Image (tube, rainbow, N blue to C red):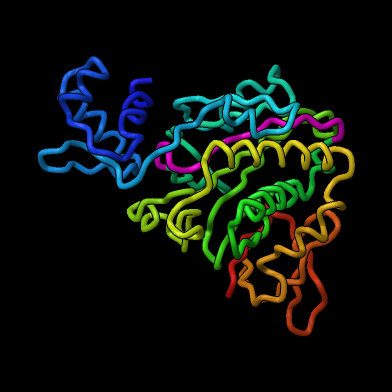
Amino acid sequence: MRARSLLAALATGMPVSGTALATQLGISRAAVWKQIEQLRARGLPVTARAGQGYALPYPLELLDADAIRAAAAPGAIIEVQASLDSSSSELLRRADHAADLTFVFAELQTAGRGRRGRVWLAPPALNLTFSVLKRFERGFAALSGLSLAVGVAVAETLGTAGVPRLALKWPNDLQADGRKLGGILIELGGEFLGPCHAVIGIGLNLRLPPALAAAAGQPVTDLAALCGGTPPARNALAGQLAGALTQVLEQFAGHGFAPFAARYAALDALRDRDLTVSGNGATFVAVGAGVDARGALRVRRDGGGVEYFDSAEITVRVA
């Protein structure tokens, strides 16, 4: 909570002296400095201006559960947490008793993660990191293509908000101009044959400071860069995403991936592209041929037919 209070004090983007922060937070100036250093270590670009105090290069919009609910569809349960190891980990811990369509948003994640155990870089209060629990009557096999349907919901919501040049890279990346904008991680629990549940984690770059972009290990972008320097309002976008995901997840529960196939095809970043495919100790070059009715990737090798792959089997890059 002290970290959130410090974020709130810096949220205007105007300089605030260490003395004023100490008084406001009820701590010493040394403790203020320590808190500032912790925020910097997590990627928040706090500067110290001589004779003025600490400041951010732009204002922050802190997460507000009421504001998110106002923009979300009925039926979604919205929670905002100041700090978590991971919003997905939180829902996995509560999976036995949490209500269907519970959304957990985190202002700060200390151990966010992506596909194949990778770390998800997210500075405090700048991006959107959240997870949703969805229950399904059917088993794991019926959830094939879920990450693609979720990607469609996110991309279409951003497109409606005015974000240009969006695409989906199978199986779980949101891109713009070939750079990663966001990611989706799905973790399953319950009975293999049903009923089961999915915890769907989403990370979306609104503002990604240069130091974190350089540490990403791949080309990345953010909504600020795509929207002329100012990303969409954070709480409004969070609510719109929660509303869109509520509808998409309910539709998927009843009909699977089929209703989303054409919508995914319109956003497919890999179709007709030369690809490098790696998995099971082998690497080969192929051409993307879309996805099938289950959401499996289709690729075509020279002189061969179409091959099909599920997301757990391979990694894919544009050659």
Q: Residue at x 33, y 21 (%)?
A: 2
Q: Is residue 30 above or below residue 307?
A: above
Judge whether residue 299 can be spotted in this image.
yes
Query: Total label count?
Result: 0
Residue 28: % across, % down: 17, 19
Q: Is residue 208 left or right of residue 238?
A: left
Q: Residue at x 27, y 19 (%)?
A: 25
Residue 296: % across, % down: 77, 58
**Relative depth, front residue between 164 and 213:** 164
Q: Could you tell me which quadrant the C terminus lies in? A: bottom right
Q: Residue furthest top?
A: 26
Q: Is residue 194 above or below residue 183?
A: above
Judge whether residue 280 can be spotted in this image.
no
Residue 312: % across, % down: 68, 52
> Was residue 132 drawn as part of the magenta stretch in this picture?
yes
Q: Could you tell me which quadrant the N terminus lies in? A: top left
**Relative depth, front residue between 105 and 183:** 105
Q: Is residue 317 above or below residue 130?
A: below
**Relative depth, front residue between 203 and 136:** 203
> Was residue 285 drawn as part of the magenta stretch in this picture?
no
Magenta span of residues: 123-138
Q: Is residue 126 left or right of residue 49?
A: right
Q: Is residue 293 left or right of residue 86?
A: right
Residue 147: % across, % down: 70, 48
Q: Residue furthest right?
A: 255
Please tell me in which quadrant of the rendered image residue 73 appears.
Answer: top right
Please tell me in which quadrant of the rendered image residue 69 appears.
Answer: top right
Q: Residue at x 48, y 45 (%)?
A: 120
Q: Residue at x 77, y 50 (%)?
A: 145
